[in-house]
Image (cartoon, helix red, strand yellow):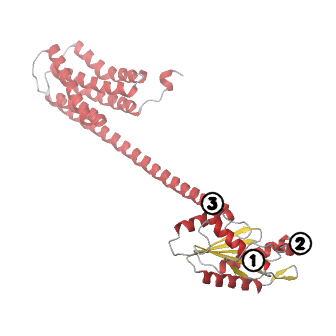
Amino acid sequence: MSHTAARKTHWIVSLNHRNRSGSFILLFGALGLHLADRGYGFITWLLLALQFLVYPHLVYLAALRSSRMLQTEMNNLMLDSTLFGCWVAALGFPLWITFTLLLSVHINLTVFRGLRGLAECLLAALCGIGIGLLIGGARVDMYTAWPTTLACIASLTLYLLMVSQVSFQRNLSLRKARERLRDSERLLQRQLEEIHGLQNQLREQASRDPLTGLYNRRHLDSALERELISRRQQESLCMLLIDIDHFKQINDAFGHQAGDRILGKLASILTGHSRPQDVICRYGGEEFMILMPNMTLELARQRAESIRQAFAEMTIGFEGEQLQATLSVGLSASPDHAESVSGLIRCADQALYQAKAGGRNKTVVWGPETVAVPIPDN
């Protein structure tokens, strides 16, 4: 395959080749009638044939072989203007021929290059007129016979129809391309929304405990820091640290499936006794934590007692056995007990240890007298 054939032809080059070939044949007929009417000789006829029958294919090949195909085609349009200027001046400016040739070539350049193309075409046509005057002399013969006039009108009309059809097809192609682009944008938007949703799901899954569905410790760390930072002065942030009493004994006696069942039931109770703004998480193993923003210490203690009592009264059926367990709860608050994250957790942990050491199944609020003491095995 040749280099020329292998390259993709620019659509303007292909379009102009079709338009130029068709319109030049029509113009050949119109100018031929004028030459016959005026009795021009063989040389003029030969030039006419070269200009309107051979020239369109030569400039097309020149554009195909050019490394700058589009620029070469724009130069070809300028050459059209120059040659048309030569013809109208050499023939003595016959009215309909002048009008048809100059209007058609000016329309062509304006379509592709706007007002700049119009100005460039006018300049090229004036240069062609100057060359034509040098060749044919300064004379004016504006008359055209009626067959020539009709042929010019027909040629110009058909040319304008061709340009209109091409414009319609280009507009149709552009509209279809815009519709495809909008469809692609809508599809891309849906895909982005799906990706965003999947990312949210992944983030949610990464911050959730798979067994209980509650937040995990990773989420707690960021939530606790955020709550302490956003807390206004005088607003309280309460923390409940909850531990299932003798959980290891339940696992040893009935198996981990029984322990998982208890963990799930506790998660349901914690969710049912909490507000939407509370943060509930599985802190680790059988330990759970609840952050209660903007809640007084007394209300937090009452909430802890409600959770503890609800869990103690609950029985869980498992393989024919009725399981029961109790909770020990440690309660701390900011700013009453600590200002920092580590301080708030430490106070809640010491209060929980105190609850364990005091016999379990109770809620202890941290106080200055509360210290971490050794407690029996879980």
Quarter of the image with the C terminus in it: bottom right
Front residue of 208/165: it is 208
Q: Is residue 186 left or right of residue 74?
A: right
Residue pointed to by mark 3: 203
Whole-percent x, y for residue 162 in the image: 31, 38
Residue pointed to by mark 2: 252
Per the rendering, the mark at residue 281 is none
Q: Whole-Å distance between the Cαs marked 3 and 2?
A: 34 Å
Q: Which marked residue is nearer to the observer: mark 2 or mark 1?
A: 1
Query: Which numbered disc, 2 or 1, marks the residue that appears first in the sequence?
Result: 2
Tell me which amino acid carries mark 3: Arg
Whole-percent x, y for residue 201 in the image: 63, 61
Examine the rendering and report whether any part of residue 101 can be seen.
no
Q: Residues within 10 Å of mark 3 (few under 14, many from 20)?
A: few
Query: Which numbered disc, 3 or 2, marks the residue that appears first in the sequence?
Result: 3
Tell me which amino acid carries mark 2: Asp
Taking the spot 32% from the left edge, 21% from the top edge, the residue there is 55
Taking the spot 83% from the left edge, 71% from the top edge, the residue there is 257
